[in-house]
């Protein structure tokens, strides 16, 4: 049977919760008196639908049913989980719990999204205080896994139930064992926020400069290792104790406005070093360095694909260097022209340690894309509604490319007409052909969804190249079918 | 001519600088009295060689020449850039600058990696104070782009020169306009560090819990947008002012130990809102949300590929749901068995809005990998030294898969012997075949690098499947070559 969650308060956070439950197959009833609530939740849900499935490698369950209801009692009827996401006013929250508990089945968890209140504050004089806990998520709720689960004095059963529900919708529930204002993560956020306000106020930095200082440096580190594991690695071979010995004295320096510092005693150093060993001791520092670097490469490549933040810096750096390596592709007299230069990247390697199969086709696409740009059928041409589609491909694997290998892609036109380009692509490492690909490209009107002749100026650029390539020897592998004996 | 950089101090930071310069084609001379320096730098350089090229889409320049030299004067001779990365002791740093300036050509920049000292402190009574600036990087220096460039009172020419040199080695130089202890980023790091020490000391959280609180939530956000842009988006449609109105009162609450807070005046709110408009106003909140989500998907997918941090959570979540969608692949009586379920993810889409060409081959690999696991030739088999390699492929593109489409991959064995599997893979959306792939797999002894018979138990599992598939109709597209007319 479909499970039902109830969300009280449909803002950015409540809407995010609704989306996460819905996309994980739960029915969701939302109560929010805001007349704009339905539109706002719809927009969060649209974002979530475009995003969350991209993280899954198994098909998502059928989306649950969303309903906006006019009363709290309708929202909580039959719900096995109730999220409270109303504004941060203690009296308001307590009133909401009272109203919920008048209708909800005893034993139903009420999880507050509060950023700062402690569970014992929230429970107040509730009739069933045990059912009220904190489950504090992070925006966007439908993507970020963290949820701080603070049971206060609730039972072990309630806690376990809450943790399990959070796991079931793909979150990472962090059990906060001892309640404290702002739980754990928001204490850091608040410290950074306060420090940032000082920097802006004192004219040291603008909001943009502060954001760059975060996202170009330590922000990238913190998505994959936290504060302590990062510093353990930074300590180098000597590890955590060395790091602490090095930076311990800074506690006495005016490095932040946060000047109320704990005594830096041997006990504190031992406590932290011991916890750090328990946390990360299963890896050597060298291993952690490589894990960190691999993660950072993943993040940076993702940003480069999207031309954003640190990824923009990488693209600019490539542009500066590209000129130095450009071959100046001719039209291919004597030999097919080199259309693309590539290097085998770590993400291209499979579990055999070789370049993964589909990357050979990727390398060919890079090559044919460059060729299409050369004849004037690049991105602008596509944006205007026409494109060459690949209809058919034959790949012959002749060698194994390995990490770091430099590859070039050449393209030879075998034949062409108004609608077709029949091409032969060689992926080469030095003089060795590691794969050859015979491909048929079909020129299409994308809107009409059917083949049509290419634009005259494209054909005019293609013609002399095709003519020049006619003089090149026809490759043996052309016209071959799978399993055919070599002649 | 090759440019030369000089690095004084070859620890984790100095070694990281050396690696970044070398891999960008500079010669590097390092001075470090530590007898272990050569080994340590070698290890950082090995990490960097495995990492930095993975960020580049143009071939890297030839690596520069590294030399470890016994004196500072040898290190700086002929250098056009000098990095100081010695321990954080003011007197030591000043002594190093004195020694450098006795030999270095006038006008050569000396850039300190100091985390905290202000340039005017560093300059002290140097003979040429203008040449001494701060260029503060972040570990690992060879991967993270941020470098805080603090000129203190140095000339505009020195600043410009320093910024350009940093850009040229792929970094993001952030000009810190007004010097302050710990520059910008480290003020946040120090605030978080101090807050974290309190949490550990007070027994609220362990180092591991703190790290999870960071890397499962806000840490992921900060690699792509900083503090202010993130909060601008969190404010929803109402933006930065709304966010500040909502969280402004928290400044008075005990949410962190950083209690020395600035007055939350209208002026401060206007200053920040204005700067935020200048920084992010070119995007609507909806656009920023989508950019953020796309970036987060990139980060999370990278972690999922590496089975680390939040990526582990995603894998666990998939595992929980996989059972619900498993078809229980039979041996294929009546129809070829479904070996893989896939969904077209945003990263699979090309500029046409369709599934990118190489992903069809990727989908086929997922299918054949599952088949090889079925017959006992999975990861363990590969680890033991044998594998099936793809020798040849023919692809027929029959339809266009689009974002979100659910695809299945079926595999039909056309024929097989001890060394070969000739297979026909269909990538289907519902009942429609969007691509068919005919492939020849060759069983190889990976160490010897040549074909050999598969293990008896693999052949024993393969035989009944091949036998069952013999009864299936032979696909029309099998045996076809590129451009062949349909019969």
Image (cartoon, coloured by chain):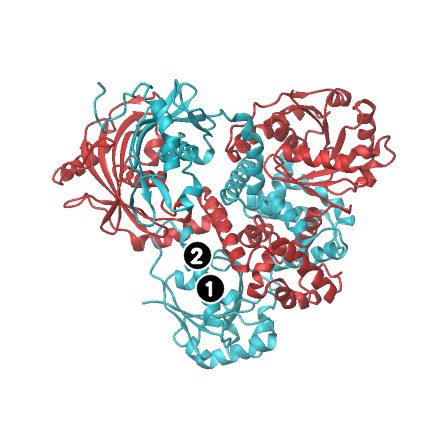
Chain colours: A red, B cyan
The image quadrant of residue B281 is: top right
The chain containing the residue under callout 2 comes to: B
Residue B170 bears which disc, if any? 2
Name which residue lies at 72% across and 67% down.
Answer: A266
Rounded to the nearest angstrom, the CA distance separating label 1 from label 2 is: 21 Å
- Image position of A78 with respect to B227: above or below: above
Residue indicated by mark 1: B43
Percent position of residue B462, x then y: 37, 31
As rendered, which of B410 and B248 lies closer to the eye?
Answer: B410
Asked if one can make out residue B274 in the rendered structure from this viewpoint, the answer is no
Task: Sort mark 2 into few (<14), some (14-19) or many (20+) by Cα contacts within 10 Å.
Answer: many
Kindly state the secondary structure of the residue where label 2 is placed. loop
Percent position of residue A367, x then y: 29, 41
Name which residue lies at 44% across and 66% down.
Answer: B42
Name which residue lies at 39% across and 17% down.
Answer: B334
**Label 1 close to label 2 by CB (< 8 Å):** no
The chain containing the residue under callout 1 comes to: B
- Image position of B118 with respect to A340: above or below: below
Residue B72 bears which disc, if any? none
- Image position of A486 with respect to B1: above or below: above
- Image position of B115 with respect to B477: above or below: below
As rendered, which of A407 and B242 lies closer to the eye?
Answer: A407
**Number of the front mark, 1 or 2:** 1
Residue B45 in the figure: left or right of residue A431:
right
Percent position of residue B193, x then y: 67, 58
């Amino acid at each position: 049977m479909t499970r039902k969650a109830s969300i009280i308060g449909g803002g950015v956070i409540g809407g995010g919760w609704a989306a996460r439950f819905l996309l994980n197959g739960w029915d969701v009833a939302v109560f929010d008196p805001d007349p704009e609530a339905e539109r706002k939740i719809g927009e969060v849900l649209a974002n979530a639908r475009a995003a969350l499935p991209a993280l899954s490698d198994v098909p998502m369950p059928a989306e649950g049913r969303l309903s906006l209801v006019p009363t709290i009692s309708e929202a909580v009827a039959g719900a096995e989980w109730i999220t409270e996401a109303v504004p941060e006013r203690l009296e308001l929250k307590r009133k909401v719990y009272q109203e919920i508990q008048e209708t909800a089945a005893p034993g139903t968890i009420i999880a507050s999204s509060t950023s700062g209140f402690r569970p014992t504050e929230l429970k107040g004089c509730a009739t069933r205080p045990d059912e009220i806990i904190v489950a504090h998520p992070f925006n966007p709720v439908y993507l970020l896994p963290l949820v701080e689960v603070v049971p206060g004095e609730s039972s072990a059963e309630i806690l376990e139930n809450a943790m399990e529900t959070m796991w079931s919708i793909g979150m990472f529930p962090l059990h906060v064992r001892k309640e404290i204002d702002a739980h754990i993560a928001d204490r850091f956020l608040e410290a950074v926020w306060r420090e940032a306000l000082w920097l802006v106020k004192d004219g040291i930095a603008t909001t943009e400069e502060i954001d760059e200082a975060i996202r170009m440096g330590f922000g990238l580190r913190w998505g994959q290792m936290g504060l302590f594991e990062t510093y353990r690695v930074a300590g180098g071979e000597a590890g955590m104790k060395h790091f602490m010995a090095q930076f311990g004295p800074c506690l006495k320096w005016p490095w932040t406005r946060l000047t109320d510092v704990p005594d830096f005693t041997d006990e504190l150093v031992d406590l932290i070093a011991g916890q750090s060993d328990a946390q990360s001791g299963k890896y050597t520092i060298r291993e952690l360095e490589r894990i960190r670097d691999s993660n950072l490469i993943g993040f940076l490549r993702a940003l480069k694909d999207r031309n954003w933040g640190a990824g923009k810096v990488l693209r600019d750096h490539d542009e500066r260097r590209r000129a130095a390596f450009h071959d100046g592709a001719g039209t291919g007299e004597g030999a097919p022209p080199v259309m693309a230069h590539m290097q085998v990247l770590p993400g291209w390697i499979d579990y055999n340690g070789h370049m993964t199969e589909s990357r050979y086709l990727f390398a060919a696409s890079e090559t044919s894309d460059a060729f299409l740009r050369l004849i004037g059928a690049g991105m602008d041409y596509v944006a205007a509604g026409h494109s060459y589609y690949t209809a058919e491909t034959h790949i012959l694997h002749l060698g194994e490319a390995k990490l770091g290998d430099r590859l070039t892609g050449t393209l030879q036109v075998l034949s062409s007409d108004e609608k077709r380009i029949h091409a032969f692509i060689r992926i080469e490492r030095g003089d060795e052909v590691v794969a050859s690909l015979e491909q048929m490209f079909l020129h299409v009107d994308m809107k009409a969804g059917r083949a049509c002749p290419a634009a005259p100026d494209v054909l005019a650029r293609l013609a002399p190249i095709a003519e020049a390539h006619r003089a090149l020897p026809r490759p043996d592998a052309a016209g071959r079918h799978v399993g055919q004996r070599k002649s």
